[in-house]
Image (tube, rainbow, N blue to C red):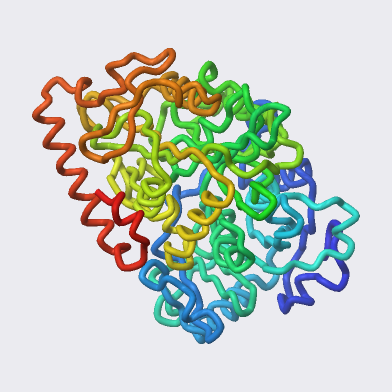
Amino acid sequence: MTIGRVNPKFTLEAQGLKGLGKIHYNLADPALVELAIKREEAELGLGGAVLVSTGKFTGRSPKDKHIVVTPDIKNTIWWDNNAKMSQDGFHNLKDDMFEHMRGREYCVQDLVAGADTQHAIKMRMVTELAWHGLFIRHLLRRPDADDLNDFIADYTVINCPSFKADPQRHNCRSETVIAMNFATKMILIAGTEYAGENKKCVFTLLNYLLPEAGVMPMHCSANHAKDNPVDTAIFFGLSGTGKTTLSADPARVLIGDDEHGWSERGTFNFEGGCYAKTINLNPEAEPEIYATTNKFATVIENMVFDPVTKELDFTDDSLTANMRCAYPMHYISNASKTAIGGHPKNIIMLTCDAFGVLPPIARLTPAQAMYHFLSGFTSKIAGTERGITEPEPTFSTCFGAPFMPRRPEIYGDLLRDKIGAHGATCWLVNTGWTGGAYGTGSRMPIRATRALLTAALDGSLSKVEFRKDANFGFEVPITAPGVAEVLLSPRRTWNDSADYDAQAAKLVKLFTNNFDQYMPYINDDVKAAAI
C-alpha cells in the first residue's frame, strides 16, 4: 500500500525493494509527527515537539562505517581512515536487509543535499522509523512539492535499525553497520537508532563527490553580515566546539550550522536545518536555539523530561551528554532564505582544548591556517561518539576525519587554493578550558568568545596590538574590547606557571608527533609553519 506523493517510475518496488508493507512517501511534518506517536516511537512534547530516545546508541559509530571496495574508487579512498567492505559482503547485506524489510512499514523522503543548484545531489531517504523521516526532512533540503512528481534520486539511503548485521557474512565489524557503495549509489544503515547517522552519511558522500567538481566540502557552520552576503564567515569544528552556538549570532544572518561547500560562486549550505546540542542550553545565551525545543515537529533526542508536564531537563545527562534537537532552518529568525553566501572573508577554526593551553583567539597566517586545518586538534566531548565519557584530546584532520573518504591533502589543497584566490583572514578560537586543564580549570566563558568573534568579524580586532605566542608562533591579541586581558594570556590564568609550561610542552609535542604524517605531502611554507 502506497501513501503520499511519489514519481510512479521511481517507487521502492522499481528500485528492487519488493514485498514491503505500507509505504509513506514524502509525508509532511504533521503526518510524520502523528505517525511517530501512533507507532509509539515518540511522545508529544511541549509545543508539539517530538520526544525520542535512541536506546543504547546515543552517538555516532565511526568504526562501523564501511566503504565498498570497487575498481572505480579503490585508488581514491583514504583507506587508513575508512574501513573496507567487500562487494560480496555488501551484496549479502543488501539481500538480507531487503528480505528483513518484507511486509514492514517504511517512510520515504525525497530530498536534496546542497543549496547551490549547480552542485546539489538528489537523495532518497528510506527510514524504518517515522521520526527518522521527520529528522532527515529537517536536516536536508525539501524540493518543491511539484518536483516530487518526476523526482529521481542520485543516491539512496536505507536505514533499518531493527536489522542486525552479521560481521562474517557481511564483511563488517559488528551488528551495527553503515555501508557506502559509491558504484551502486546506495548506502545501507542497520543496527542503530541514532539519527545523526542519516545526515553524516550524506556528508561523507558529498565529501567524496564534490572535490572532483572543484568544490571544497567543509565541516563548518557559516553566517554573513546583515544585508551583505559578501561578508561571510565560516566556522570549522568538530561536535562540541561551538559551531552551532557561535554561528547563531543574532547580529548576523545564519547560512547553516554544520556542513557547507565552497564553490566557484561562494559558500552554500548542504542542509536545510540544524542539529544542535542541548546540554546546559541557556535561554539567555542561546535564545533562538532554546526556543526551538518547544516548537512543533522539533525532534528532541535523548533528553530527560518530566513524564507529566513534559518539561525538558537541560542539565540531566543520565541518558547521554550528546542530547540534541533537530529543527528546520526557518525556526531561526535570522536564517538565510537562500542558504548561500559569498567567498569567506573570515575563516575561524574552533578547537576545544582540554589541556587549557591555547588562547581564546589567535590570528593565523595562511600557512599556519593550513597547519591547523590538517592537524584538526580538539577534544572529543562526552557523548558525541560511543564510549566517550569525558573530554579526550584528539587530532581529527580537516576538523572532520570521520567524514573524509579522500586523503586529507585533497581537502587541504582545495582550501589553500581558495584562500589564495579569494583572500581570507584566518583565526584559531579555543572554546575549551582556561585556568587549568579539564578537571581543574573552567570552560572558556561564552560571552568572551562571542565578544572576540564580533571584534574579529567587524575588523576591530585586527587593529589592536598582538604578541607572538612562544609555543605555537601565531599572533595573540594583547587586548580586546569587552574581554579581560588576563584571559588572553592563558599562562596568567593558571595558579602555577610551571604547571602551565609543562602542559604546553606536552601539547606541542602531541602536535609535532601528529603532523609528521603530513610532512611528505605539504609545501615549504606549511613546513616552515609547523611547530
Name the one closer to the observer, 46 or 240.
240
Q: Does residue 436 sit above or below 113 in this rendering?
A: above
Q: Quadrant of residue 13?
A: bottom right
Which quarter of the rendered picture does the N terminus lie within? bottom right
x and y, in percent, of residue 124 in the image:
71, 63
Q: How many marks?
A: 0
Residue 51 at least partly seen: no
| In this rendering, position of residue 149 left or right of residue 335 | right
x and y, in percent, of residue 474 in the image:
32, 37
| In this rendering, position of residue 93 left or right of residue 516 | right
Residue 522 at least partly seen: yes
Look at 51% across and 30% down and name the residue there: 246
Q: Seen from this angle, which residue lies furthest left?
A: 498
Look at 78% across and 41% down and name the residue there: 30
Q: Does residue 342 sit above or below 90 in this rendering?
A: above
Look at 80% across and 52% down and name the residue there: 143
x and y, in percent, of residue 451 in the image:
47, 20
Look at 52% across and 84% down and name the residue there: 87
Name the one closer to the observer, 373 or 277.
373
Q: Does residue 431 sit above or below 464 in this rendering?
A: below
